[in-house]
Amino acid sequence: LAKTTQPISMDSYEGQEVNITCSHNNIATNDYITWYQQFPSQGPRFIIQGYKTKVTNEVASLFIPADRKSSTLSLPRVSLSDTAVYYCLVGVWGKFQFGAGTQVVVTP
Amino acid sequence: EAGVAQSPRYKIIEKRQSVAFWCNPISGHATLYWYQQILGQGPKLLIQFQNNGVVDDSQLPKDRFSAERLKGVDSTLKIQPAKLEDSAVYLCASSLFTSSISYNEQFFGPGTRLTVL
């Protein structure tokens, strides 16, 4: 299983862009990179998934360099409601694990 | 579309007692997961089912934990006997299964918060 490393916490102000980088040096050829968001007292919620280059959806963008040894989740113009823990997962069906996550705190 | 249902939401027991958690996945989701999430940590996968078969239970403490999914739909996770270190939130998740090797989005339930005294 690929081990992931993320910053423990990040602070931001409302309206700013937040970029969280996840390191996964031993990513395997078939592994996908997936990000989840978790609010207190709730289960994690899927945000975005990618294999290489850039993926964008209505809430975030995911940047993956050519060597795929890291990835960056970008949250544009965050609001107070984006305060949560963000997890990076690397793997395929049946082989993956959650890391410790990054606590993002957004203040006014 | 109904989400993943779990019950109970909260449970307090004494150490050495037994406890069971129930999960009903999203209709049509063949894959079901049970996670343990200790305060301040990421979810740890305990067991993964594909229909009623086990895909991975390598991190399930089999001397005290058991799980079943007899009809390939809902599932039960049991702890017997409980220890203090079992205090955690137990999350159930489900996902569709496809023949692709890609990772499939998981949908999580609200979890059961277990306190062992």
Image (cartoon, rainbow, N blue to C red):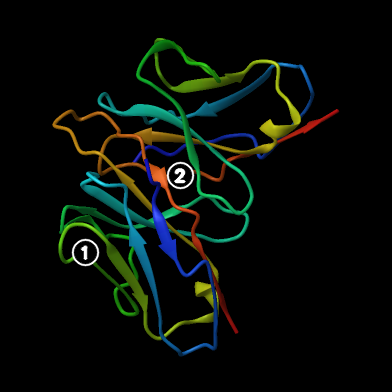
Residue at disc 1, secondary structure? loop
Q: Mark 1 points at which residue?
A: B69
Residue at disc 2, secondary structure? loop
Q: Is residue A43 left or right of residue B76?
A: right
Residue B91's x, y, as percent? 44, 57
Chain at numbered mark 2:
A
Name above or below for residue A96 compared with residue B92.
above
Q: In this view, does A14 lie to the left or right of B113?
A: right
For the N terminus of chain B, give its image quadrant. Answer: top left
Instruction: Tell me what residue is drawn at x 49 percent, y 39 percent.
Output: A45
Q: Which amino acid does label 1 sit on?
A: Arg
Q: Name the residue under label 2.
A: A98
Between B105 and A18, the residue placed more toward the observer is B105
Say which of marks 2 and 1 sits in front. 1
Residue B94's x, y, as percent? 32, 47
Instruction: Tell me what residue is drawn at x 48 percent, y 22 percent.
Output: A70
Name above or below for residue B28 compared with residue A105.
below
Name above or below for residue A45 compared with residue A74.
below
Residue B108's x, y, as percent? 43, 48
Q: In this view, does B110 lie to the left or right of B24?
A: right
